[in-house]
Image (spheres, grey):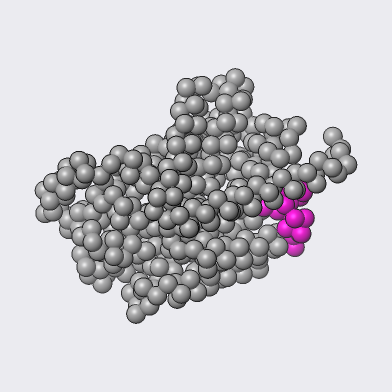
Amino acid sequence: MTMHRKRNKSLGLKELVAIALGGMVGGGIFTILGVSVSMIKNLTPVAIFLGGMIALLAAYSYVKLGVYYKDEGATYAFIKRTYPGSHFAPAMIGWFVVFGYISTLALYAYTFASYSISGTAFAHDIWVRKIVSIGIISVFTAVNVWSVNGMGKIEDLMVYTKLLILFVISIVLIKVGAPNMQDFLTSFGGEIKTISFISVLIVSSITFVAYEGFQLVINATNEMKNIEKNIPHAIYTAIFLAVLIYLVISFGALLAIPAQDIIQNKEFALAAGAGKALGSIGSSLVILGAVLATSSAISGTLFGSSRQMAAISEDRYLPTFLSKRKMNIPISAIITMAVISSLLILVGGLELILEFGSVTFLLVSLLMAIANFKMRKKTNSSPLITLLAIGALSLGGILILYYEFTHALHQMRFIIAMYIVLTIGAYVFSRRKNMSQPEAK
């Protein structure tokens, strides 16, 4: 994810849309395509579209709370200010948000590794993939600990370059696959009849993590012009563009690449398929796009979320050593995030990391929608839209757990165990805070 820290009101709509797109298009399409096609085949664009609609519903509460509170602390700050009498609420959202970012950090690193080794003899070696994943996290951990200056410009370059590459890939894939349009439509029609709508909804929920990142706009509140106008315009525009990008790429890939190839190589589906459809140049272009996308996402996630982790620690809802800074850099938080995400990579594969990340951000977005419903009169929010968001986000989380229960019970146990641990951790720290001396007001 890309994060900017300018010290003046210099961010307009164009810059804010770029921030949100940089956060969303951070490896998501490279990850979700193979998983989605393996589950619902040519109905993948439908699931991607529905996932975008869920993201729009989720964004509604972020927009309303962001405009009302005007607080760059975003998710954590909204809950803390909505429930000022509670210690457990901010502690719980703090733990969930931090571990949501840790899961996306692991997801981006795993995707980076999958694509970077896709053209080698180790393409299907899961332990080489895990080692490379942990290696790239280590590289960007060192970058964030020792050298922050200049990263903003480098990340901007990576964001715009990856979007340009994705656009080129999409056009070429559609052009190459155009002769297969009739076969695609025939298969699409047949799969509508044979693949249940519940399966499509499950995939749309799993792909929700690909839209996580739009809230980065709110982190730039102190640097943006015209908050009331730019927060909604930037977030809704960025989600619309992300949906469009994902739809075009998925449609082009399904036209040009046989479904069985996408499924067989789901960890690096676009690279494998582009190699067959477009030759070595096409494969190299996809790999470059994936490496750029995930690199910018890894660096930005470590930068932004480590600072949020440090802020939560300063409020004593996380261990206090995480708030320690050197030259204003939260070194302990950065290293801790890197270590935990590396452990998640070691114990889980692509699908577990993807599903844990999606469930986490569905849950966090659900808590935002509930907070917005509580504040609906002050935020001037529509009760109907907010309730629709609560319903859609709740259903999404339930569907992912249902899929885990019926297809991968061990993964469901891991996810539930993680949430129990996070909830207990949040409860313990909220109790400590509650029993400490009252803070000065």
The image quarter containing residue 373 is top right
Query: Residue 272 vs residue 441: left or right?
Result: left
Q: Is residue 73 visible?
A: no
Q: How many marks?
A: 0
- The residue lying toward the viewer, choosing from 381 and 69, is 381
> Looking at the rendering, which quadrant does residue 223 occupy?
top right
51 relative to 128, above or below? above
At a point 38% along the width and 77% down the height, the residue shown is 122
Residue drawn at (13%, 46%), measured in percent from left and top? 186
Q: Is residue 307 visible?
A: yes
Q: Nearer the viewer, residue 185 or 344?
A: 344
Residue 425 lies, in percent from the top left, at 69, 51
Q: Whole-percent x and y of residue 275?
A: 25, 68
Q: Position of residue 189 (x, y in %)?
A: 17, 42
What are the residue bounds of the magenta stretch? 308-326
Q: In which quarter of the view is residue 340 placed?
A: bottom right
Is residue 438 covered in magenta?
no
Please determine whether, in this image, residue 431 is positioned above or below residue 121: above
Report the quarter where the C terminus lies. top right
Q: Write the residue at 17% across / 56% down.
A: 177
Q: Is residue 314 magenta?
A: yes
Q: Position of residue 113 (x, y in %)?
A: 44, 69
Query: In the rendered image of this protein, does residue 90 appear above or below residue 321?
Result: above
Nearer to me, 40 or 169: 40
